[in-house]
Image (spheres, grey):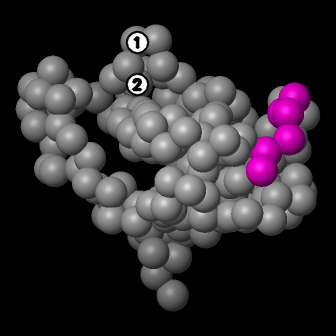
Amino acid sequence: MQQIRRELLTWEDVDKLIDHLLTQFNTEYEVMLMISRGGIIPGGMLAEAMHILNIFTASVDFPPEMANRNARLLTWPKFLQFPEDRLLTGKRVLIVDDVWGSGRTLTSVRNRVAGSGGLPHTCVLHFNPYRNLFEKCRPDYYGAITDAYIIYPWEIRRGQEGVLLDPC
């Protein structure tokens, strides 16, 4: 079995990714939709820098992973939290998460925003094209491309996948 490369980021690394993202935006957004939990911190940083006042959260759950890749694509998401359609209709919506891995969460949220009459664009700190389940879908904006498992500075104390970097 192949070992997954891990990359530990500092707050300075995150600041650089945010700065890089800010140079990419060519439109103003009326609404930000942060995907919990990963999109909360980068979304807050972007909302502050972009002066976005209308901020909402979305929480999405999928059934446990299935071994068959095609079966995973057919699994329907369960939206645990999502803003009302009237808050998105006709609005330019920036959807923010930390990582685009498989793409299931962001694709589901983007489709639901579009179904609500919103104009969705997706944004992540990291895009992993090697895990992406959708051939033609990718984030509209991303800070970096990676094949690593990213550990953000706000995740260090609680650890990720059994890796506790600072037990105190």
Give the structural element (helix, strand or loop) at label 2: loop
Determine which residue is flagged by label 2.
Answer: 132
Q: Is residue 63 left or right of residue 115?
A: left
Work out whether residue 58 or residue 116 is closer to the camera in this orientation and state it.
116
Tell me the residue at 51%/87% (across/down): 168
Give the structural element (helix, strand or loop) at label 1: loop
Residue 39 visible in the shown view: no
* Residue 72 picture quarter: top left
* Residue 118 picture quarter: top right
Type of amino acid at the residue the image marks with label 1: Glu
Dominant secondary structure of the residues highlighted in magenta in the image: loop
Decide: few, some or many residues near mark 1? Use Cα within 10 Å; few <14, some 14-19, many ≥20.
Answer: few
Q: Is residue 51 left or right of residue 85?
A: right
Instruction: Between label 2 and label 1, give the one nearer the viewer.
Output: 1
Q: Residue furthest bottom?
A: 168
Residue range corresponding to the magenta coloring: 25-30
Type of amino acid at the residue the image marks with label 2: Asn
Determine which residue is flagged by label 1.
Answer: 135
Residue 162 position (above or below residue 126) = below
Work out whether residue 132 or residue 115 is closer to the camera in this orientation and state it.
115
Q: Is residue 112 left or right of residue 141?
A: left
Q: CA distance from mark 2 to mark 1?
A: 7 Å
